[in-house]
Image: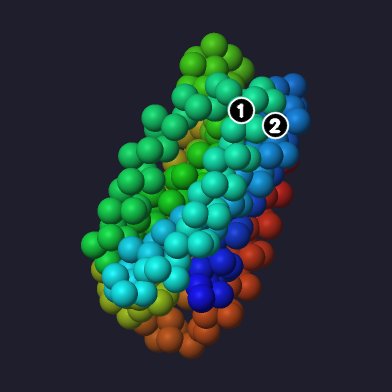
């Protein structure tokens, strides 16, 4: 019998990275009048794909003798994802298939890292964040060529989606510094540097493409990671406290992205 974790992922922090980009992409697509009924099966396909990816990572990490218990959920989620994705394509999202060429290297890199027992590596986390954030990009721009066709009108939406990725990528660095590499100076430097660069870069596009809410939001995330990762303070935070903090920040980036 498959363990419960094979059917329902335990990485609760991943939910925000799945839901927020999808909502933002959907709202932006509705504003641009490029949304459709295909969003319903696509949402279900994304959820099923995440569950299947979780099962696949468990399969790759398990001893060969225990992999048989994972066959059923792996086959179930793979088949369900294929059916739902096909339905979305039939309903009008066929151009999203172009994005598969972009998503495939990221997916295979994340799988490769898992197969080599390096699923906690930052590069693996950034790859999965890019995949999740990329769903919002694909919803708004059904194929890469659409960005060029709609330029420069597409610039504000593209910037919003990129900065949303920047936030969730920063979460990867932050959590790494708070849990796996807690107390290590290099981990604190990496997350503080990332958040500083993201905040500074908002000034480059603020005038034309971003609202003032973005630098304010990134100033908050920089303050959060600087304060929480301080050597004298990092060990005092529980996983639950970290999770609650990220929930509020996910709601914050959602609100900022939709302003």
Q: Is residue 61 visible?
A: yes
Q: Quadrant of residue 42?
A: top right
Residue 176: x, y in percent? 38, 69
Q: CA distance from mark 1 to mark 2?
A: 7 Å
Give me the residue at 65% from left, 33% from top: 87
Residue 47: x, y in percent? 61, 52
Q: Which residue is mark 2?
A: 38
Q: Which residue is mark 1?
A: 89
Give me the residue at 27% from left, 66% from top: 117
Q: Is residue 49 visible?
A: no
Residue 66: x, y in percent? 36, 74
Residue 178 in the figure: left or right of residue 138: left
Give me the residue at 60% from left, 39% from top: 83
Helix, strand or loop for disc 1? helix
Q: Counting residues from the N terminus, which is met first, the one under dot 1 or under dot 2?
A: 2
Residue 20: x, y in percent? 64, 50
Q: Nearer the viewer, residue 167 or 31?
A: 31
Residue 3 in the figure: left or right of residue 253: left
Q: Is residue 136 above or below residue 147?
A: below
Q: Which residue is situated farthest in the left direction here?
A: 116
Q: For the residue carrying disc 1, how many other residues have a C-alpha within 10 Å: few (<14), some (14-19), or many (20+)? A: some
Q: Nearer the viewer, residue 18 or 185?
A: 18
């Amino acid at each position: 019998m498959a363990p419960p974790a094979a059917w329902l992922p335990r990485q609760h922090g991943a939910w925000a990275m799945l839901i927020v980009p999808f909502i933002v992409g959907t709202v932006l697509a509705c504003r641009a009048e490029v949304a459709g009924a295909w969003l319903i099966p696509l949402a279900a396909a994304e959820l099923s794909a995440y569950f299947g990816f979780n099962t696949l990572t468990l399969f790759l990490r398990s001893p060969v003798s225990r992999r048989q218990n994972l066959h059923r959920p792996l086959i179930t989620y793979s088949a369900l994802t294929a059916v739902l994705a096909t339905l979305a394509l039939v309903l009008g999202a066929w151009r999203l298939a172009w994005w598969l060429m972009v998503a495939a290297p990221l997916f295979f890199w994340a799988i490769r890292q898992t197969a080599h027992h390096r699923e906690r590596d930052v590069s693996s986390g950034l790859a999965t964040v890019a995949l999740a954030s990329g769903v919002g990009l694909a919803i708004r721009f059904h194929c890469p060529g659409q960005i060029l066709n709609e330029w420069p009108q597409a610039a504000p939406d593209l910037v919003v989606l990129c900065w949303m990725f920047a936030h969730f990528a920063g979460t990867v660095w932050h959590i790494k510094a708070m849990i796996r590499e807690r107390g290590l100076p290099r981990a604190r430097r990496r997350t503080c540097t990332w958040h500083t660069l993201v905040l500074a870069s908002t000034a480059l596009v603020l005038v034309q493409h971003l609202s003032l809410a973005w630098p304010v939001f990134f100033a908050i995330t920089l303050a959060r990671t600087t304060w929480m990762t301080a050597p004298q303070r990092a060990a005092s935070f529980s996983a639950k406290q970290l999770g609650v903090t990220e929930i509020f920040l996910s709601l914050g980036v959602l609100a900022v992205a939709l302003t």
